Every structure is written in structure tokens, then in C-alpha cells.
């Protein structure tokens, strides 16, 4: 019973099921055949559920972190792809290079080379940083783990460093894409005037853990404020990718993809595109949705230029 409870609290599903199977065998030896069979049936059902630990060639997927990690990691199985995103060609090329290196990592490792695994995304809010992490996970058929900073960062810095080590241990044990979103909360410059020694030690711990990490997971850090990051961080990442507010050709791609299920062929893009200056990818997506909702509510699937312009002005007003 103690072993069963401990494995549950530790979030060790494999050990939990192993101990449960031993309990079923023990009941069978005592002649409690009905109870033993019920236990075996429950164990078989647990193994079939997506929350159980599942082994696959080259990867281990845990769909629901347990124990201490339950407060540190949230997890998704993304279906997004890079093809779903409207990104500048140069940025898309760099992301496809990351994917190629991961898909061909066996070939690289045979020659003493390693794929790009530690990526830093920088740029304004709403430009696609978080969605890119999701798309990379979807492309590589890996779970996306998002580090929950509210669970990681506490007023007790020694505790924060300990939790950080637990996250990197999970990165080592469970292959996936790990996203440190709003990374500036963790990686702020060590020389800031309001800094304290303990905060510097947490950042130093992160730098050491990141540098030592040799797992097969992909680590992504994203920030809207690269100027706040300690310069030493940039050297620890294999690639720094910059995101910008969308250019005119990207704006049209965003609208057309979001409105693909609607009739948008009559939209006068020459009137629309000059009005979107300063809007992010997420702003454009929301404007598309608002125009689409208005079309549906009036019993149509046709998107008008005027409806799109109104939605754009609403997004501009909301962004002020």
C-alpha cells in the first residue's frame, strides 16, 4: 500500500501500475479471484487511457504531468503545423531548418553533430511566438509542455531553483517541446538595480542547466522584451529568431487563411492593407473572426470590405 501511494504521489505511472499488478497477483494467491480479476481489468483500462505513460520508439509521452510537475508543466498534443501560419519567408526557412535537423538527427549524431534544440523567440506580443512552439511540436509529433511560471517562481528563491531543476529533469526524461513563455520573468538582467543575490543565483542555475542539457527535447524560450534579458542568455541558445509585426504580403495571407471558409474574393485589399499598420498576427486573426461572425449573423458567408475595415478599426481601438 505504501509503495502504491508513493508511486502515485511521485507521478510515476509505470511504477504505480506495476505495484497494482503485484497487488492483483497477491489477491489471486490468497484465493480472491474475483477481486484479482477486477484489479487486472482496471489496470488494463488505465493502460488504454491517454493519461497513462506511453512508450513509443525514440520518445516517451506523458499526457498529464503528476506529482510536483503538475504545478510546473501544462501539456498539450498540438495539431498545428507551420503551414497553418503566415510567416515571413526568411523566418519560415529557419524554422524548417530546425525541423529538418530534428528529423535527421540520427544522421547528424553519427557524425558528432547535434540538431538545434535551444531556441529563443523575441518580438512584439501577438506575432506568433507561442503558436510557433505549438506548430513545431505538431510537426515533430511531440507533446508541448508549457512551463507555468506562477508555479515555478516563488518568494523563496531556493525553492525556485529546486523546481527549475525538476523541470530540466523532466526535459531529460520525457521528450517533447518545452516552452518558457514570458521568459523575461526568469531571465531578467542580473545587473538590474532592483535585483537581489538570490535572483541572480536562480538565473545562474538556469544558465548552467540550459548549457548542460543534452536531452532530445526542444527547448523554446519566448519573450516580448529581449532588452530585459541577461546578455549571457543569448549565447546559450542555438538560435535566436526575431518576430516582427506582419508586412503587407503577410497580412493578406493571414486574412485569407482565416477566411478560407468564407467568400472573401470581393474584398478590396488595396483599401484594407493600408489600414492594418501596427496590428499583430493575433489582432488580424481576431479582426477576421469578427468580420466572419457578422457575416454569419446576417445569414451570409460573404465577407465585405466594409465589414473587414470596421473590424480592423475595432482591433486598433482595443489595442490602444
Image (tube, helix red, strand yellow):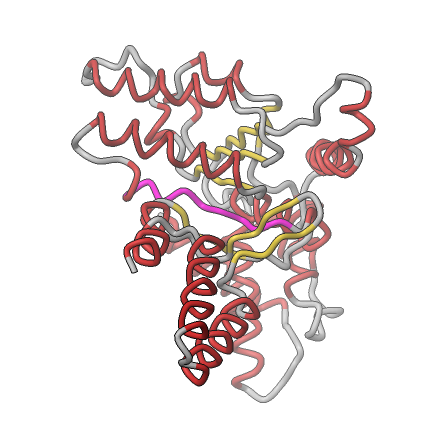
Rendered location of residue 19, percent (x, y):
42, 58
Horizontal arrangement in the rendering, residue 254 relative to residue 11 (left or right): right
Residue 162 horizontal/vertical position (percent): 30, 30
Assess whether residue 149 is covered by the magenta stretch: yes
Q: Nearer the viewer, residue 223 or 52?
A: 52
Q: Kindly tell me whether residue 252 is visible in this rendering.
A: no
Which image quarter is the N terminus in?
bottom left
Judging depth in this view, the residue of 149 and 270 nearest the camera is: 149
Q: Is residue 277 above or below residue 77?
A: above
Whole-percent x and y of residue 129? Answer: 54, 41
Q: Which residue extends farthest bottom?
A: 299
The magenta segment:
142-150
Q: Nearer the viewer, residue 172 or 8?
A: 8
Quadrant of residue 169 within the rendered picture: top left
Image coords of residue 47 (percent x, y): 54, 67
Residue drawn at x 40%, y 32% is 183
User: Looking at the image, is 213 positioned above or below residue 190?
Assistant: below
Q: From where the camera sits, is residue 122 visible?
A: yes
Residue 235 painted magenta: no
Q: Residue at x 55, y 55 (%)?
A: 284
In the rendered view, would you say 48 is above or below 31?
Answer: above
Q: Residue at x 44, y 85 (%)?
A: 34
Q: How many marks?
A: 0
Residue ID at (39%, 74%) = 30
Q: Is residue 310 left or right of residue 188?
A: right
Amino acid at each position: 500500500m505504501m509503495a502504491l501511494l508513493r508511486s502515485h504521489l511521485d507521478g510515476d505511472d509505470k511504477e504505480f501500475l506495476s505495484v497494482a499488478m503485484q497487488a492483483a497477483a497477491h489477491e489471486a494467491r490468497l484465493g480472491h479471484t474475483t477481486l484479482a480479476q477486477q484489479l487486472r481489468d482496471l489496470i488494463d483500462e488505465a493502460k488504454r487511457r491517454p493519461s497513462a505513460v506511453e512508450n513509443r520508439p525514440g520518445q516517451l509521452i506523458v499526457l498529464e504531468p503528476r506529482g510536483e510537475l503538475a504545478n510546473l508543466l501544462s501539456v498539450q498534443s498540438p495539431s498545428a503545423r507551420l503551414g497553418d501560419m503566415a510567416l515571413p519567408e526568411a523566418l519560415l526557412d529557419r524554422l524548417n531548418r530546425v525541423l529538418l535537423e530534428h528529423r535527421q538527427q540520427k544522421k547528424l549524431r553519427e557524425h558528432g553533430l547535434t540538431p538545434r534544440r535551444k531556441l529563443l523567440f523575441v518580438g512584439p506580443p501577438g506575432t506568433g511566438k507561442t503558436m510557433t512552439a505549438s506548430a513545431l511540436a505538431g510537426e515533430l509529433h511531440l507533446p508541448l509542455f508549457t512551463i507555468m511560471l506562477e508555479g515555478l517562481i516563488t518568494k523563496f528563491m531556493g525553492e525556485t531553483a529546486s523546481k527549475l531543476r525538476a523541470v530540466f529533469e523532466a526535459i531529460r526524461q520525457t521528450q517533447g517541446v518545452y516552452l518558457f513563455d514570458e521568459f523575461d520573468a526568469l531571465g531578467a538582467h542580473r545587473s538590474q538595480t532592483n535585483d537581489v543575490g538570490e535572483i541572480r543565483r536562480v538565473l545562474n542555475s538556469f544558465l548552467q542547466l540550459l548549457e548542460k542539457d543534452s536531452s532530445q527535447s526542444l527547448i523554446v524560450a519566448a519573450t516580448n522584451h529581449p532588452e530585459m534579458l541577461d546578455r549571457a542568455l543569448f549565447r546559450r541558445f542555438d538560435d535566436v529568431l526575431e518576430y516582427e509585426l506582419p508586412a503587407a504580403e503577410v497580412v493578406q495571407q493571414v486574412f485569407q487563411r482565416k477566411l478560407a471558409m468564407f467568400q472573401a474574393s470581393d474584398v478590396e485589399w488595396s483599401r484594407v492593407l493600408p489600414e492594418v499598420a501596427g496590428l499583430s498576427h493575433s489582432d488580424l486573426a481576431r479582426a477576421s473572426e469578427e468580420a466572419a461572425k457578422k457575416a454569419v449573423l446576417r445569414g451570409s458567408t460573404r465577407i465585405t470590405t466594409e465589414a473587414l475595415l470596421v473590424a480592423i478599426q475595432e482591433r486598433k481601438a482595443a489595442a490602444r
